[in-house]
Image: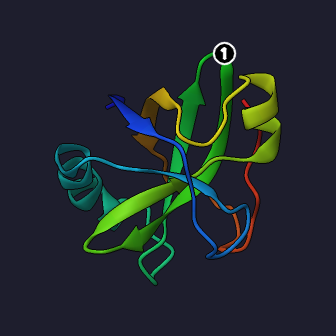
Amino acid sequence: MEQTFTAELFEWRGPAPFYWVTVPEEVCEYVRIEAGRATYGWGVIPVSVRIGGTGWETSLLPRDGGYVLPVKKVVRLQERINEGRAVAVALQVASRGGRAANGTGSTM
């Protein structure tokens, strides 16, 4: 089931790509429920995401009891998103579907 929310893009000097949005708690609840069928086993949850007209597959990372969503540079450029801007996100937990744990997934 697709979840939608709006969140502000921020820079975090954690793992690449450095730009993220925080997933709101109500969406984190959905992620926790669906995580069992999709997780790689270390808290990383594969998802299908859409911001504007750009869709891609990535993984949520756990942070401060919730999750953060990495936003690729190509997405930021295509959608003209800068740090501090609120963006509308559509997100769905995606089963790995045979992808390797370190697989990059596909661009939709």
Left or right, residue 92 beside residue 59: left
Picture residue at 73% right of the left edge, 47% below the top: 72
| Front residue (pair 22, 13) | 13
Q: Position of residue 35 (x, y in %)?
A: 33, 62
Q: Position of residue 30 (x, y in %)?
A: 22, 48
Q: Amino acid at mark 1?
A: Gly
- 53 above or below 106? above
* Residue situated furthest bottom in the rendering: 42
Location of mark 1 (residue): 53
Quadrant in which the N terminus appears: top left
Secondary structure of the residue carrying tag 1 is loop
| Front residue (pair 75, 99) | 75
Q: Position of residue 38 (x, y in %)?
A: 43, 61
Picture residue at 65% right of the left edge, 74% below the top: 101
Number of numbered discs on residues? 1
Left or right, residue 103 beside residue 10: right
Quadrant in which the C terminus appears: top right
Classed neighbour count for the residue bearing mark 1: other residues with Cα under 10 Å, few (<14), some (14–19), many (≥20)? few
